[in-house]
Amino acid sequence: MIVGNRVGYQILKGGNSSFQTLNPRLNEFNDVHIYEATDDEIILAIELAESAFYEYSKISGFKKSLFFQDIVQLMESQERELYELYCCESGLDQDRAKVELTRTKNQILNFASFIASDEWRFCSSEIPDKNSVPSKPELIKGLFPLGPVVVFGASNFPFAYSTIGGDSISALAAGCPVIVKSHPLHAGTGDLIAKIVIQAAIKNDMPEGIFSNLNSNDYSLGEKLIENPKIKAIGFTGSINGGKAIMRLSQKREEPIPVFAEMGSSNPVIILPSVLRDSAGLWSMNLSNSITNSAGQFCTKPGLLFLVKDEYSTELIDMLVNNVVSKDFQCMLSSSMCSNYNKILKEREGFVKLNYRQGDVKPNYAKPTIGICNSSVFLENEFLAEEVFGPFSLVVECENIDSLKRCISSLKGQLTGTILTDSNEELIETGIIEILQLKVGRMIYNGVPTGVEVVESMQHGGPYPSSSESQTTAVGIDAIYRFVRSICFQNFDHKILPEFLK
Amino acid sequence: MIVGNRVGYQILKGGNSSFQTLNPRLNEFNDVHIYEATDDEIILAIELAESAFYEYSKISGFKKSLFFQDIVQLMESQERELYELYCCESGLDQDRAKVELTRTKNQILNFASFIASDEWRFCSSEIPDKNSVPSKPELIKGLFPLGPVVVFGASNFPFAYSTIGGDSISALAAGCPVIVKSHPLHAGTGDLIAKIVIQAAIKNDMPEGIFSNLNSNDYSLGEKLIENPKIKAIGFTGSINGGKAIMRLSQKREEPIPVFAEMGSSNPVIILPSVLRDSAGLWSMNLSNSITNSAGQFCTKPGLLFLVKDEYSTELIDMLVNNVVSKDFQCMLSSSMCSNYNKILKEREGFVKLNYRQGDVKPNYAKPTIGICNSSVFLENEFLAEEVFGPFSLVVECENIDSLKRCISSLKGQLTGTILTDSNEELIETGIIEILQLKVGRMIYNGVPTGVEVVESMQHGGPYPSSSESQTTAVGIDAIYRFVRSICFQNFDHKILPEFLK
């Protein structure tokens, strides 16, 4: 399979550098050869996006919703090829591929139904009053798209947070053309999806340039896209370092632009004493599944577990360790992610007790691991609070509730925070809710943080550094508001107002 | 009058540097001596704000609304003192003081009535479904305050955009404590207002620290406030350079925070040919009043007037020049603003024809001036598009509609854009609406941009650099959303949810 760059409705292969994707399970290259985008191809994609913007921003929500529905239909007709390549390029299994494609299709259909009427773009209006002194004008406020948006595909969600995942579809729904910087780990899957999006766009007479898909195996493509003055916003899901670099580049532009970066999280779980007494079995099982699901490569994986050391705590920890350690060794998304996982565990070795199963591992496979330390060690070594991407979680044993609260207070911003308790009195007495709430975007009560519902009430985004813009969400319908701004029309003759504001 | 720093409920004068305010009309210092805040006072204000936040964020909207109403009542009982000091410190006249205080009171009462019920903080909820596989959790999303906010007082709005102006009251309404960096030009007025806010806070049992008012005549106070990790957002109204500096400082923090900076604008006005033919008299009068109102010291002053040179255009320009030039010389807010105004006009002299009345001016008084140039000169000299703070506007004569459109396309982001026309056919044919819309936050049809209604449908904020965050507004109820973020509660027992989410 030869993969070019989809620049508007063309497939361009003008460059002389290319790369291949790896099958991490087999540790062999896939027969997928990807051309890296040239400077000319990048510029052309941006110019097409800009010129498409004028037309696309005026197309009715209803017409866009038909386009979206066709994307889903085309996905369904090509499920088999999509699953196959997805598994080969990610090391994730077919079940996960199916769940993720279903989720992706639901996201697209959610937006299709939300924008089918343009009503959502109307904000409010003010009735004029010619008799007041000074006279009050008529004001009508509506939402308008920002302009061309660049979306960085995520390594861990080839469908749901890449080519036509949450960022792309919410930007397109808002009326913004999208240029995807495809994730190199699954560039073949990305190209299959991009082909579908473009087929649907052509079928629905969308202006050429509303969608392009560019490939590169290094940072330069991303940099060139961010630096171009025609780009008006960025969507990103990935590491903290990647997100920070994008924020820096955006701020260095003559016109800084909004960067919606979702940058990972350690997702603290607070296990209160009542749980240790009464439901240790249940939660050690639920947590171990949540920690190791998809090899722990979820941004909402519970990475920090806090509990108060008492006569019952050892029992829960033992069960948790047994559950996690007895899981199969797990294939990670890439060899560099796997070696990074092993490197990070090695660095933690002097500080925390690591529990994992001995034995040989295949290349790119990780050992599910539970670390244990006490709260003093945790508080003295800030890096222990950082996200570890992979099937690992750190149990922090605290002397008492106060030291547990100090640990929570020491955390930076997180996507989620979870509280496990069998007693509301206990919970209220600790005052944990108020402390945890300051740190997170989503609070979970007696549950696990993995499993992010794609609905309006979801909040996927928390204080920095879990997100660059804690006031927005990357999941659910509200994600669309990241890519619009309000314009107020004062005293306009209604005949010349946009249709949805009349 | 000796002015200290209001740190929580104390008045502190621990420093050994102080300054005085100037009466720009008389060019004499006022008898207002202001102590600059010391480092200890700054730290204390921040610590009080942080500890007040926990309590204040839980206080009901209803209780906060009573506090707001008392602020307005106290303002009314002290109107005379407020007007007097306002005029002495700003050089603005009593009529303007009255209009601005009325506006400020209305802003406060608008927020009081908006937050009287906490309903606005509820976003949406999702009904749980235990039968679906996997089971769907209950999700409830609500809005929560960000934390302590720093507000920089604006030079040109001692009441409406300073101490308890739009930024402060929207942050307090959101549940955020506020530390004001008072504007040194009107620090006495700021202190009178701060005293009122604190009296109302004490009367309503608000936690100490929800409001502090600090003074300084240089940048260091602002820098220390922005750099402190306990501060979670910034509100600013002022110059582009000031706004940029604040954005840079915020990005350099370990945790970057949102900066809501409103940084001025040239507010282009497009005068289409039909107006030149039929309503030149009306619009030359309206525009000249708008340009010189309050000495042209409004962020929405029409600073750029574009028209197509034809047989009628000279007549409108002549009338406009006559109207503007015949106005009285106008007192500016400060001597440095006035000398800056003169310096900028001097710099433009070689590029544009300047029209003003000859004659001696008193210190701090500016000559109302109209500049004229053609579109080639305008396009070749980017600095001509920049805001000139003061009673000046630049007429750009374009050869035809295309060169006019090139001029509009060359502009950076603006707060407003105005179109004057007597013919919708003419307007549609030019395609001006689409081009202008990309550049502005508010579009005005046959009106002037000054006069910003304080209502929900107002949009006061445009693309960068007119605002740092074009997706928010600094005026109207929607300004409150700058200071909150969403938190989603998953499967929480309703008994322990915040009252407004139950």
Image (cartoon, coloured by chain):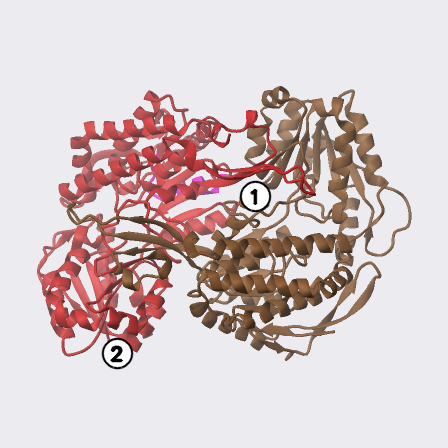
Chain colours: A brown, B red
Q: Residue at x 42, y 32 (%)?
A: B118
Amino acid marked by disc 2: Asn
Q: Between residues B30 and A473, which one lies in front from this camera angle?
A: A473
Dot 1 corresponds to which residue?
A458
For the N terminus of chain A, which image quadrant?
bottom right
Classify 10 Å Cα crowding around label 1: few (below 14), some (14-19), many (20 and above): many
For the C terminus of chain A, which image quadrant?
bottom left
Amino acid marked by disc 1: Met
The chain letter for the residue carrying disc 1 is: A
| Residue A19 percent location from the top left of the image | 72, 71
Q: Is residue A56 above or below residue A436?
A: below
Number of numbered discs visible in the structure rendering: 2
Horizontal arrangement in the rendering, residue B215 relative to residue A377 (left or right):
left
Circles 2 and 1 on the same subunit? no
The chain letter for the residue carrying disc 2 is: B
Badge 1 element: loop
Q: Residue at x 81, y 26 (%)?
A: A315
Q: Is residue A316 above or below residue A388?
A: above
Dot 2 corresponds to which residue?
B400
Please indicate, yes or no, whether residue A493 appears anywhere in the rendered image: yes
- Residue A280's disc is none
Horizontal arrangement in the rendering, residue A50 relative to residue B406 (left or right):
right
Whether A60 is among the magenta residues is: no
Quadrant in the picture for residue A167 = bottom right
Q: Nearer the viewer, mark 2 or mark 1?
A: 1
Q: Between residues A489 and B375, which one lies in front from this camera angle?
A: A489
Q: Which residues are magenta?
A: B214-228
Horizontal arrangement in the rendering, residue A110 relative to residue B369 (left or right):
right
Horizontal arrangement in the rendering, residue B45 relative to residue A303 (left or right):
left
